[in-house]
């Protein structure tokens, strides 16, 4: 399964959408069908790599243009 989410609302960005994204990721990966899921977040204030759960590897980029990364 492949999931593509386009958006820059991911912590430390505050607000309901950033919270929704975290909860959506946790809910999706609670399925036994998904073994791993890399996530790429563009336009984030704090570029970094982190493990959200044992199945989700999150990579955030500071750029606002995802075509530069692609």
Image (tube, rainbow, N blue to C red):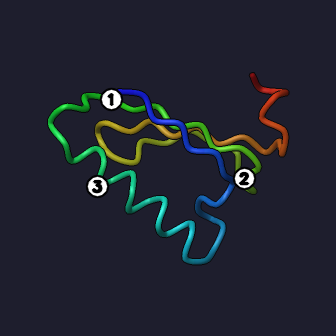
What residue sits 59% from the left and 58% below the top?
A: 10
Asked if 41 appears above or below 68 in the picture, the reply is below
Residues marked 2 and 1 touching at CB (< 8 Å): no
Q: Quadrant of residue 16?
A: bottom right
Residue 33 position in % (x across, y down)? 19, 31
37 displayed left or right of 17: left
Residue under pointer 3: 27
Estimate the spatial distance between the alpha carbons at disc 2 and disc 1, rounded to whole Å: 22 Å
**In terms of sequence position, does the residue under pointer 3 or pointer 1 come before the other?**
3
8 displayed left or right of 27: right
Quick one: SS at disc 3? helix
**In terms of sequence position, does the residue under pointer 2 or pointer 1 come before the other?**
1
Quick one: SS at disc 1? loop
Residue under pointer 2: 44
Circle 3 or circle 1, nearest the eye: 3
Residue 51 position in % (x across, y down)? 42, 42
Residue 4 position in % (x across, y down)? 53, 37
Residue under pointer 1: 36
Asked if 65 appears above or below 28 in the picture, the reply is above
What residue sits 49% from the left and 42% below the top?
A: 50
Q: Quadrant of residue 65?
A: top right
Estimate the spatial distance between the alpha carbons at disc 3 and disc 1, rounded to whole Å: 13 Å
Residue farthest toward the left in the current orientation of the protein: 32
């Amino acid at each position: 399964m492949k999931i593509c989410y386009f958006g820059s609302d991911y912590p430390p960005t505050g607000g309901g959408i950033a919270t929704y994204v975290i909860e959506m990721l946790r809910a999706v990966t609670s399925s036994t069908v998904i073994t791993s899921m890399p996530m790429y977040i563009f336009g984030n204030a704090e570029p970094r790599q982190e493990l959200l759960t044992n199945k989700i590897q999150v990579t955030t980029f500071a750029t606002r243009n995802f075509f530069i990364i692609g």
